[in-house]
Amino acid sequence: MPGVTLEGAAAIEVIGGALPKLTERGIIGAEDFPLMRHLHSVVGADEPLNMPWHTFFGGEEENKAGKG
């Protein structure tokens, strides 16, 4: 998303960019903050959106409507 001037995009750049450094230092785990990590890859690295739903709330299979 080159050239985007939204404050949210700027926050994603800063916070998402800090996550690998925090992970390397052992402050957070590699599995922590999956949404922010993915948003950073989309906004900061211009990668395609491919939301990793399986990493949220225990996974998508258990949360499908009609199961329960």
Image (cartoon, helix red, strand yellow):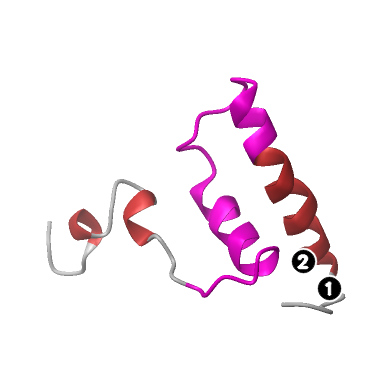
Rendered residue at 57%/27% (across/down): 28
Q: Quadrant of the C terminus?
A: bottom left
| SS at mark 2 in the image | helix
Residue extending farthest left: 67
Q: Is residue 18 left or right of residue 39?
A: right
Rendered residue at 87%/75% (across/down): 5
Q: Is residue 35 left or right of residue 63?
A: right
Q: Which mark is residue 9?
A: 2
Rendering coords of residue 6 (x, y %): 83, 73
Question: Is 56 placed above or below 3 here?
Answer: above
Rendering coords of residue 39 (x, y %): 60, 61
Q: Is residue 31 magenta?
A: yes
Label 2 crowding class (10 Å Cα cut-off): few <14, some 14-19, many 20+? Answer: some
Q: Amino acid at mark 1?
A: Leu
State if disc 1 and disc 2 touch (CB < 8 Å).
yes
Label 1 crowding class (10 Å Cα cut-off): few <14, some 14-19, many 20+? Answer: few
**Occupied quadrant, residue 22:** top right
Q: Amino acid at mark 2?
A: Ala
Read off the magenta span.
20-49
Rendering coords of residue 1 (x, y %): 71, 77
Q: Which mark is residue 6?
A: 1
